[in-house]
Amino acid sequence: MSDSVDRGVRFTHSHNHRDGESNDSSGTFSLANFWEILNEAVKAVSQEATKLSLMFSKPPLPSDEDCAKMGDCVQKSVLTLCTVYFWLPKSQGVTLRRSVRDATAEVLEGLVQLLDVILSSPGQSVSQEQLTSTGSVWAACDHFDQIPKDNRSAVLAVLSSCVGLVKDALEEMQQALAESQDPFGDVLDDDDDDDDDEGGRGNQDRYWSASDRQLIGQCEGLLKASAASLRKLSSAVRHNAQLETEQEIAQLDDLADAAAHVSPCVDDLALSLYPPVDRAAVEQNVCRLAAVLKKLLDITRSSHVCAEADVSWVEFLSGAVEHNLEKVRSLLRSDS
């Protein structure tokens, strides 16, 4: 174990733990020091995985003593990595901590897979499966170079993912509307001669009516407002986010959590708009998405990332959400 990793482990064990996190109330926590120690711990796991794979790459099998030593080394590297992860306190950002947790879990899952492969075919020459599993551990370890290094970057990564998912859903809906009267035409081709009218192309449940298309057009406004809200929030976080106080860090976590609810609501609404359109489900999903967007914009408005210049777009998008919600509900009432 390297000196810096050993220092980190001793530091972690010397602090009181609560809910799996170190107590950094003394204010001595150093994020830069954490990353230095974590990177060395990750490197150690990668090296032990390599040694393990080489040990079982060709006959004969290693001795029981060598296996025990190897097992101890692998276990020590894993425990060190997990210990250093738990050193990162939630006060540095729940979103950041979640990102590090997921990356750590990916390494551990890769190691488990490698061990399973080795145990399933002991004493044989190295297999493609073993090579692939070893490579998976290396890739999981290398991934630590790409993960966010502070909570601002972690929140921006979450927002970027949300923007992409909402954009994809909106584009799929627009493409389906533009390409065909039958949105399932490329999936349910009428190739079977014995299809009757009800089960084949004559099934109107697979088509949008004129009123369906009008409803979708109104819902599209809410989908666009969702994408715009996430884009503008990403810009505000990128330019205005601060990490000086725990309150500022916690506000960023609140924004990430609120933003993460947008994409599932967008997906639910988009799915309910495919034929046969269930208007009750559409109304429910429209109301749910509008509520999520209003909450996101309210949290944005009260956070430190909302500078004076940002107030106007927050208020504009809040009004756009309410306007589109009322237009959809009005259309649904008139249809009924």
Image (spheres, rainbow, N blue to C red):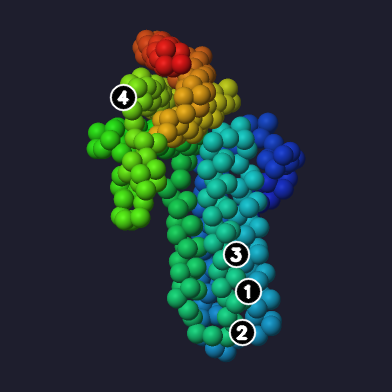
Q: How far separated are the C-alphas under marks 3 and 1?
A: 15 Å
Q: How far separated are the C-alphas under marks 4 and 3?
A: 55 Å
Q: How far separated are the C-alphas under marks 4 and 1?
A: 69 Å
- For the point 42% across and 12% down, which residue is it? 334
* Marks 4 and 3, the one that precedes in the sequence: 3
Residue at the spot of label 2:
62
Quarter of the picture containing the N terminus is bottom right
* Marks 4 and 1, the one that precedes in the sequence: 1
Q: Which amino acid does label 2 sit on?
A: Pro
Determine whether label 1 and label 2 are within 8 Å by CB: yes
Nearer the camera: disc 4 or disc 3: 4
Which residue is more in the foreground, 115 or 153?
115
Nearer the camera: disc 3 or disc 2: 3
Residue at the spot of label 4:
210
* SS type, badge 1: helix
Q: Which amino acid does label 1 sit on?
A: Met
Q: How far separated are the C-alphas under marks 3 and 2?
A: 20 Å
Which residue is more in the foreground, 194 or 218?
194
- For the point 64% across and 46% down, which residue is it? 86
- For the point 73% across and 45% down, which residue is it? 14
Residue 49, given in percent of the width and then of the height, sits at: 54, 68
Q: What residue type is labelled 3?
A: Val
* SS type, badge 2: loop
Residue 15, given in percent of the width and then of the height, sits at: 72, 42
| Residue 165 visible in the current orientation | yes
| Residue 232 visible in the current orientation | no
